[in-house]
Image (spheres, helix red, strand yellow):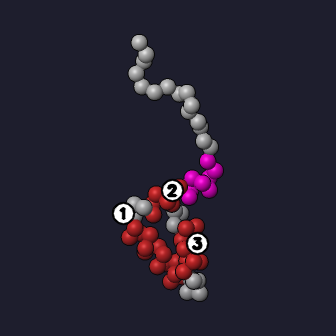
Amino acid sequence: MTPGGKGTRGYNIVTMTHHEVSQAHLYILNNTAKVIPYIDAHKKEVAALNPKFNMMRVLQEHNGTFMT
């Protein structure tokens, strides 16, 4: 008789950098319906505070500052 459940054979522990964790977190937030209005508002705020930024630069700034 074997015990139920899964064992730990083949279990891999993956260590992620802070940057990778932040990217994963941002990805999840960008795909969560309840967060989308906040993302849109933040992008508009970034664009308003930096009128010379093009859309690509606004997105870079947003991605770098949204979670803070």
Residues shaded magenta: 16-23
Residue name at image x 50 percent, y 83 percent: 48
Residue name at image x 43 percent, y 16 percent: 2
Q: Is residue 56 above or below residue 25?
A: below
In the visual, does 42 lie left or right of 20?
Answer: left
Near mark 3 (Cα within 10 A), the count class, few <14, some 14-19 or many ≥20, is: few
| x and y percentages locating residue 38 in the rendered image | 41, 69
Distance from Cα at disc 1 to Cα at disc 3: 21 Å
Q: Amino acid at mark 1?
A: Ala
Q: Is residue 19 above or below residue 63?
A: above
Q: Amino acid at mark 2?
A: His
Which residue in the structure is indicated by mark 1? 33
Residue name at image x 47 percent, y 73 percent: 42
In the visual, does 22 lie left or right of 45?
Answer: right
Which residue in the structure is indicated by mark 3? 60
Residue name at image x 43 percent, y 74 percent: 41
**Which residue is most to the left?**
34
| x and y percentages locating residue 14 in the rendered image | 60, 41
Distance from Cα at disc 1 to Cα at disc 2: 14 Å
Disc sitting over residue 67 in the figure = none
| x and y percentages locating residue 40 in the rendered image | 43, 73
